[in-house]
């Protein structure tokens, strides 16, 4: 039923877009705002902001169900950094996290560490940086469009941003790379402000934010230099910026990039040692330097449309029935991209710098990079959805200027989609088993700790089972490392936890088992008591329970 509704709304949107594209209507950004918008723009903005705030914070602990494995890793590292100033492997303020061996960007963990220091180590607290930066994204998006174009276009643009499934779903959990879209737009906001005002301190702030964006995801190491090289090169040619302005961006950006550059050299075995004051540069167990390659283009071309508009291979990134931006956004994005490209070409001919040009460059650069990424998915290219939503806003504004009635129809379609999506998300989706998300093991581990036994055997049935036991009962990283055993990159033991089920029965221990039914039966036959926590079973001798 949902798919049929989406198809109908898509057809309506296509018809409206085609009708609007036939009409000769140029974007006139200098036109006077209507009295209604002048009077109620702030109120409408705050209504959208409040609705978005509720949609990304309601039942934050319960939906999505459980913790993603990478989220759990960053959570425990944030706890360690907050309380001890080291990560779980005892690196002092690392510039990059080892996580499970292949690395993880550190900005999210540091932001979460600050929140944990203030409010305590709770899942909701850990997810707050994602919430706050998503709100910052919406605010900056409004300001950048309103200041460059008009308040009505800004309101239409943030409406699409606030109600689209991609933005709501990615805002509700704490994955490091999901910060890239917010940090990129904040950086671009200061960039365009610096160009317009020609104030060098704003260029410096731009450099700082782009530098911090490097700590959100590895793809930014390539995307940011290319985008800046194109935009600054163009601005320099048309004499809208000077060499000194470029230096004001380059210095803070370069300083913030140095630790990551050393990390890459160190983990590529180009240098044998890498140290910087205060922070540390970890040695990864394996370096994923080959994930970006031209060889991935042919395969990604087959999947890129689905990734941009429908879904990827991870069921927590998008719901196929709704897609990333809803089906009705597809024609709006396409027509809006065409219009923005035309406006950009016109701006280049007139030697002007415009928001359209900046968004087109950003989209093209990230899209080109997306084609080169191995196993490209929504997480990895999350920054591309902001320019896509901008293009949708561009054409929605065009429709609105052609016919307010047709514009209201499109707005109504978005609102209908929004209501249907939220209903589905907090009911059916809330009960969906998500890939790499776990909760039962956390509850089982908490119960096992309450039994106060000297040994806890855990069936190693999950991806990085151990990290969930650390979330259940966080120990200091120093205690965790005391008798830590690692075998071929797999944690097999720490403290009283052992992540394998022995053949001999230990009546003084607690067992946490998911799949090994034969061992469960054997323990029950030997007098063990069984308690169930979702997919996991806890077995122990009740006679020795305290």
Image (spheres, helix red, strand yellow):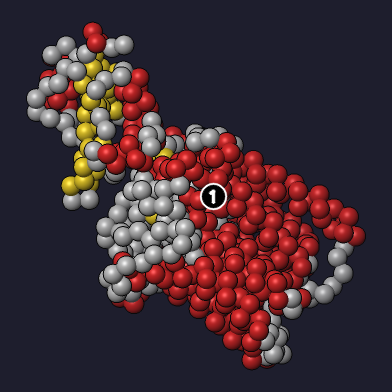
Q: Residue furthest left?
A: 504
Residue 341, horizontal then vertical, whole percent: 61, 79
Front-lying residue, 136 or 490 = 490
The answer, for residue 23, to whether it is visible in the render is no
Q: Which residue is at 33% across, 34% downward? A: 469
Query: Which residue reaches farthest front?
Result: 277
Task: Give the left or right position of residue 176, taking residue 342 as reference.
Answer: left
Quadrant in which the C terminus appears: top left
Which residue shows up at 33% across the image and 74% down it?
293
Image coordinates for residue 42, horizontal then vertical, percent? 81, 53
Identify the residue at image location x=23%, y=17%. Answer: 540
Q: Is residue 167 above or below residue 390?
A: above
Say which of 360 and 265 sits in front. 265
What residue is at 61 percent from the left and 81 percent from the top? 247
Q: Which residue is mark 1?
A: 111
Residue 190: x and y in percent read 67, 68
């Amino acid at each position: 039923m949902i798919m049929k509704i989406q198809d109908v709304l898509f057809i309506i949107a296509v018809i409206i877009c085609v009708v609007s594209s036939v009409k000769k209507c140029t974007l006139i950004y200098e036109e006077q705002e209507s009295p209604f918008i002048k009077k109620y723009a702030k109120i409408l903005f705050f209504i959208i902001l409040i609705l978005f705030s509720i949609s990304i914070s309601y039942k934050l602990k319960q939906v999505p169900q459980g913790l993603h494995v990478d989220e759990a890793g960053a959570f425990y590292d944030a706890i360690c950094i907050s309380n001890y100033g080291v990560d779980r492997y005892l690196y002092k303020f690392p510039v990059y996290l080892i996580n499970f061996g292949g690395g993880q960007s550190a900005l999210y963990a540091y932001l979460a560490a600050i929140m944990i220091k203030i409010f305590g180590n709770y899942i909701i607290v850990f997810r707050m940086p994602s919430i706050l930066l998503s709100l910052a994204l919406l605010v900056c998006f409004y300001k950048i469009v309103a200041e460059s174009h008009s308040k009505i276009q800004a309101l239409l643009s943030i409406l699409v941003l606030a109600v689209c499934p991609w933005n709501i779903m990615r805002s509700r959990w704490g994955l490091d790379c999901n910060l890239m879209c917010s940090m990129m737009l904040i950086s671009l906001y200061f960039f365009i402000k610096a160009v317009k005002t020609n104030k060098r301190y704003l260029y410096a702030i731009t450099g700082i934010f782009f530098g911090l964006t490097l700590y959100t995801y590895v793809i930014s190491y390539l995307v940011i230099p290319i985008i800046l090289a194109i935009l600054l090169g163009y601005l320099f040619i048309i004499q809208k910026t000077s060499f000194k302005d470029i230096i004001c961006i380059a210095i803070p950006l370069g300083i913030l990039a140095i630790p990551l550059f050393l990390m890459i050299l160190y983990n590529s075995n180009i240098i044998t040692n890498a140290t910087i004051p205060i922070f540390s540069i970890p040695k990864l167990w394996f370096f994923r330097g080959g994930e970006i390659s031209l060889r991935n283009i042919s395969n990604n071309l087959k999947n890129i449309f689905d990734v941009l508009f429908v879904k990827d291979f991870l069921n927590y990134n998008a719901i196929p029935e709704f897609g990333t931006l809803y089906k009705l956004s597809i024609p709006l994005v396409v027509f809006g991209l065409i219009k923005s490209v035309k406006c950009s070409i016109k701006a280049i001919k007139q030697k002007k710098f415009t928001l359209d040009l900046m968004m087109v460059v950003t989209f093209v650069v990230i899209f080109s990079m997306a084609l080169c990424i191995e196993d490209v998915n929504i997480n990895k290219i999350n920054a591309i959805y902001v320019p896509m939503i901008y293009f949708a806003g561009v054409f929605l504004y065009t429709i609105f200027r052609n016919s307010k009635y047709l514009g209201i129809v499109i707005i109504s379609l978005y609102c209908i989609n929004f209501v249907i999506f939220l209903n589905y998300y907090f009911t059916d989706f809330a009960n969906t088993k998500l890939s790499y998300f776990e909760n039962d093991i956390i509850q089982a581990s908490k119960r096992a700790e309450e039994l106060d036994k000297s040994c806890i055997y855990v069936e190693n049935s999950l991806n990085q089972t151990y990290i969930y036991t650390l979330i259940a009962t966080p120990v200091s990283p120093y205690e965790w490392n005391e008798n830590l055993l690692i075998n071929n990159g797999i944690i097999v033991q720490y403290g009283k936890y052992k992540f394998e089920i022995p053949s001999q029965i230990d009546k003084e221990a607690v067992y946490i088992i998911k799949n090994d039914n034969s061992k469960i039966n054997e323990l029950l036959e030997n007098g063990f008591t069984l308690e169930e926590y979702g997919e996991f079973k806890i077995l122990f001798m009740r006679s020795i329970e305290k």
